[in-house]
Image: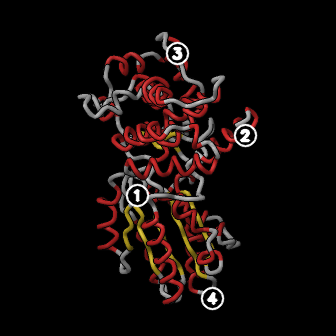
Amino acid sequence: MARDNQKSHFGTALSNLHNGYTDSLPGREEQIERLRSFLTKHIDDHVPASMYVSGPPGTGKTVSLHSLFNSDVVTKNFNIVYVNCGMIKSANRVYIKIAELLKLAGSTAQRECKVAIEKYLKSKHKSVLLVLDEIDQLSTKNQTILYQIFEWPTITNSNIVVIGIANSLDLTDRLLPMLKSKISLQPELLNFPPYTKSELANIISHRLEKSGISDMFPANAIQLLAAKIASFRGDVRYALDVTRRVIELADEKIEKKIVLGDVMAVLNNVYSTSSALDNNDENTEKLPLQQELVVCALLLILSSSKKSQPITVGRVFDVFKKICTRRNIQARDLSDFITMCSLIETRGIIKIQGQNVNRLSKVIMLWDKNEVDDVLHDKQILVDILNDKNLL
């Protein structure tokens, strides 16, 4: 392979290894077929329906549904209304967003938008496929909003399919029983389990083949990478992040060849995750140092910010760099920092809003200080950082 061709194929691989790539989704054939059958039944039987899609982060929920958006069964029969609930300011503003996507002119008041939506559902219209991603963001004390939305399919001639996607690991146990007891049309449940070693290996291999560099990535390196990540979380985003970084390292080498050691270097050194990925380590649930510092930086910002003030990735990154400088630790660049944030997110500690993460993406802390204490190796780190307001 000529050097220029190598560069071109490496670039294609880096593009194909993003988790939003939907050309093929090995390991999710069953779930995608369930979704397709669910939508087809609505079309054939002319009945409203709802579905509750659950599973840990990075298990292909959103991307599997998006893979059907361009299919004939959807484009010919549905008006797609997709809402990422993590991107709206408050739960009750979801009505404003839905009304906007349905192109319902009129007031921007929340209650009036809800009334307008329900009036629209009672009129003659094309079937509506309402997808509420990160639906856990609509969870409120009495769950009124979720109950109201999941009741919409019961409106006479509503012609609507509601699909809620839950990212929180425990939301299914908390919310689904309440939905089933409170609403008259119970949602169908579709669960996405963590990816297995073989599924992760198939995904990585397939995307490398599509990029034309499969011969440069040894099979044993793929198997090692897949095994380590499957034993940790089974999160495909993690697997793709590590694979991209391995390719980036190989691209920097003269011979441009990937070896087993490159994978180990990324797993153990670049992301400092050797202990987290070692099942025999008694500290398996502990965070590696660099990730600890990310969490501490976020807690420091939270301790001195107003609750209503959003916190961005860029702000946390700036504080993180100051912490590393103060402790004589080499800080990662923004790209590696974002990857570390995604790894922390897979543990459910934080939530990063939006599909494409950048400096302006908002970060939400999901755990409290006591929960964070349990995953820190050195509790004194947290105390010292929280007491150092000069880092802000």
- Which of the marked residues, 4 or 3, is nearer the chain's N terminus? 4
According to the image, label 3 marks what residue?
330
Q: Which label's residue is closer to the chain start, 4 or 2?
A: 2
Q: CA distance from mark 2 to mark 1?
A: 49 Å
Direction from residue 156 to residue 251 in the image, left or right: right
Measuring from the top left, give residue 382's x and y in whole percent. Answer: 37, 22
Residue at which label 2 appears: 8
Residue hosting label 1: 140
The foreground one among 166 and 85 is 166
Q: What amino acid is found at the position of numbered circle 2 in the picture?
A: Ser
The amino acid beneath tag 1 is Thr
Check contact, mark 3 vs mark 1: CB within 8 A: no
Q: Amino acid at mark 3?
A: Gln
Tell me residue 249's x, y (percent). 59, 27
In this figure, which residue is indicated by the disc labeled 4?
124
Dot 3 crowding, Cα within 10 Å, few <14, some 14–19, many 20+? few
Residue 178 percent across, percent down from the top left? 31, 67
